[in-house]
Amino acid sequence: MGKSQKFLIDLKSAMKQRDTSRMLVLRCLMAALKNKEIEKQENLNEEEEIKIINKEAKKRQDAIIIYKQANRLELAEKEEIELGIIKSYL
């Protein structure tokens, strides 16, 4: 089972549980994977999927640093939650 199928199953579960943070992150990851597939015009292998997920995690880490420097702790906390969800798939 590829990561995108796992994300879809987990998205359905998050929707049932009304877990908005997890739903947001999963939708973002699914979109990133789909965009790369469209760009590449073929299915991604597992290594490519992991690279994309790592890239999304890096975006969250950078955002956390920026938000903390700007003293926007509530936004930094939100990004930390999203980063935790992403790391659970790595």
Image (cartoon, grey):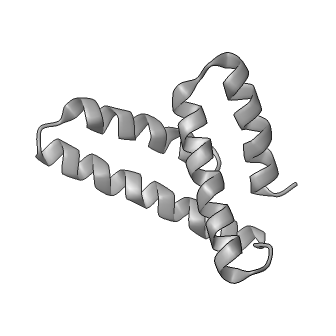
Left or right position of 34 against 83: right
Residue 22 x/y as whole percent: 58, 33
Left or right position of 16 against 82: right
How many discs appear? 0
- Taking the spot 64% from the left edge, 79% from the top edge, the residue there is 39
Residue 43 x/y as whole percent: 80, 73
Left or right position of 58 against 25: left
Is 79 located above or below residue 43 in the figure?
above
Residue 85 x/y as whole percent: 55, 39
Front residue of 47/27: it is 27
Q: Quadrant of the N terminus?
A: bottom right
- Taking the spot 32% from the left edge, 32% from the top edge, the residue there is 77
Toward which corner of the image does residue 26 lie, by quadrant? top right
Residue 89 x/y as whole percent: 65, 48
Toward which corner of the image does residue 76 lie, by quadrant? top left
- Taking the spot 75% from the left edge, 55% from the top edge, the residue there is 3
Toward which corner of the image does residue 38 lie, by quadrant? bottom right
